Amino acid sequence: SAVISQKPSRDICQRGTSLTIQCQVDSQVTMMFWYRQQPGQSLTLIATANQGSEATYESGFVIDKFPISRPNLTFSTLTVSNMSPEDSSIYLCSVYALGETQYFGPGTRLLVL
Amino acid sequence: GENVEQHPSTLSVQEGDSAVIKCTYSDSASNYFPWYKQELGKRPQLIIDIRSNVGEKKDQRIAVTLNKTAKHFSLHITETQPEDSAVYFCAASIDTGRRALTFGSGTRLQVQP
């Protein structure tokens, strides 16, 4: 399996501000995924982050709102920009480990006031 | 893109009974189907998965069946226990390239002692 950590684990932010979430993996991986889980809902893929190239965003998500960095094969960041209360969610990163199974980080719980 | 539908949204069973959760997918190219269990306040955890080269897979009290022709797959939990109470998510992906998962809407399973 993969050991995945995220920082911060939770935060309360004011609307209009930005928050950067970090994801660290204990092994080198080609792709890292960022998901959003709104309260009581399922997981929705935001984007896929490849090292050395721009992230691939899903329909409904744009780079200006959710800029992503992938500086190396074990680390990625997701920024939630110009936040509104609708951005209150759990944000999870995930990776494939041993090429077979997708594992999730513990998540970042974001509340926007 | 892929669309995954999951039923039922809630399921209540008596301890010891069986539980069945069903999912359908839209993209005939999908060939990887994992199931995740998410307990309250925790990350999704993989409980079983199946690839399209098999029709059924079992792991102790848990089994998954796949019908590629009908494009549906199901999770079967036998001899349910209170600790099985959680939200279960099915997902589908194409097992090459990005391998991004599309999730179903989730089923809240309650096992009554």
Image (tube, coloured by chain):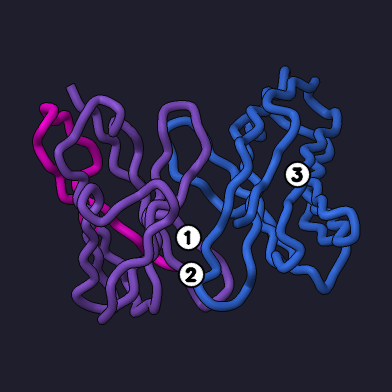
Q: Which residue is mark 1?
A: A103
Give residue A49's position: percent from left, percent from top: 33, 68
Q: Which residue is mark 3?
A: B23
Residue B55, compared with residue B73, is above or below; it is below
Amino acid at the residue labelled 1: Tyr
**In the figure, the purple chain has which letter?**
A
- Please provide the residue range marked out in magenta: A1-22
**How far is mark 2 from mark 1, CA to CA?**
6 Å
**In the figure, the blue chain has which letter?**
B
**How far is mark 2 from mark 3, CA to CA?**
23 Å
For mark 2, name the chain: A
In the structure shown, which secondary structural element does the residue marked by tag 2 occupy? Answer: strand
| Residue A56 quadrant | bottom left
Amino acid at the residue labelled 3: Cys
**Same chain shared by disc 2 and disc 3:** no
Q: Tell me the residue at 74%/29% (across/down).
A: B8
Q: Which residue is mark 2?
A: A96
User: Is A74 displayed left or right of A83 in the figure?
Assistant: right
In the structure shown, which secondary structural element does the residue marked by tag 1 occupy? Answer: strand
Mark 3 packing: few (<14 Cα in 10 Å), some, or many (20+)?
Answer: many
For mark 1, name the chain: A
